[in-house]
Image (spheres, rainbow, N blue to C red):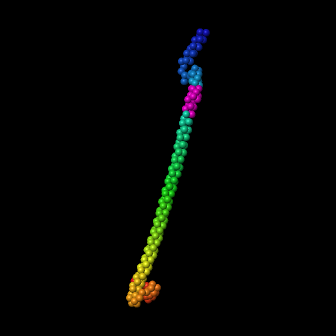
Amino acid sequence: MNQLLNAGLVLATADEMTPRLFDLDFQLLADATLTLIAVIALFFFASYFFFNPAREFLQKRQEGIKKDIDEAKKSKEDADALKAEYEQKLHDINKEAEAILSEARKKALDNEASIVAKAKEDAKGIVERANTEAELEKQRVADDVKKEMIAVASVMAEKVIGEKMDGSVQDRLVEDTLKEIGDSTWLS
């Protein structure tokens, strides 16, 4: 048995002594399998507790950034719409101001025309009153001249005739005389 043991020991040392390609044995394979299982378990553990929250955090952040970009685009579109609306209002206000100024100019011209027309009417009225007053003054002066002529003619007739004449005879004589010489002769 000793020999058998010696032969087994020799064989065992010979096996240990013989070089193997990767030096694989059962213990190494068991250790590698356990390490692989531990790494896979650690990966799933880390994935569940670390990677998934990190992924969720990154996903939320990405969604937040996308939301912020969308809001910025919407705000920019709203700002552009407001700008266009204000530019349109400003354009409309400029048109309205021009229309108001045009209307004011038109009213001023109409007012000017009515003032000029009223002034012409007033001037015409003044000229007509002056003409009327001049005509009345002319008539009054003519009446005064007639009275004066009647008085002079009466005085002369009294001297010629030698008696006093009454007013009706004087008036008839003056009228006859004026008809003979005409109004234009003695007025000029």
Q: At x 57% / y 31%, what residue is drawn?
A: 52
Q: At x 57% / y 22%, what residue is drawn?
A: 31
- Overall secondary structure of the magenta section: helix
Q: Position of residue 55 (x, y in %)?
A: 56, 33
51 in magenta: yes
Observer able to see residue 56: yes
The residue located at (52%, 46%) in the rendering is 76
User: Can you name the residue that lies furthest to the bottom here?
Assistant: 161
Q: Residue at x 50, y 57 (%)?
A: 96
- Observer able to see residue 186: no
Write down the quadrant of residue 3 in the picture.
top right
- Answer whether residue 118 is magenta in the image: no
* Above/below status of 14 relative to 123: above
Classify 149 as above or below 53.
Answer: below
Q: Which residues are magenta?
A: 39-56
Q: Which one is nearer the viewer's eye here, 33 or 145?
A: 145
Q: Seen from this angle, which residue lies furthest front?
A: 163
The quadrant of the image that shows the C terminus is bottom left
Q: Nearer the viewer, residue 36 or 106?
A: 106
The answer to which image quadrant residue 8 occupies is top right
Front residue of this view, candidates 46 and 124: 124
Tell me where residue 33 appears, x and y as whole percent.
Answer: 59, 24
**Residue 111 spot, x, y in % from top left:** 48, 64
Q: Residue 68: image x %, image y %?
A: 53, 41
Q: Quadrant of residue 44?
A: top right
Give above or below for 99 relative to 54. Answer: below
Quarter of the image for the N terminus: give it.
Answer: top right
**Would you say 164 lies left or right of 96 here?**
left
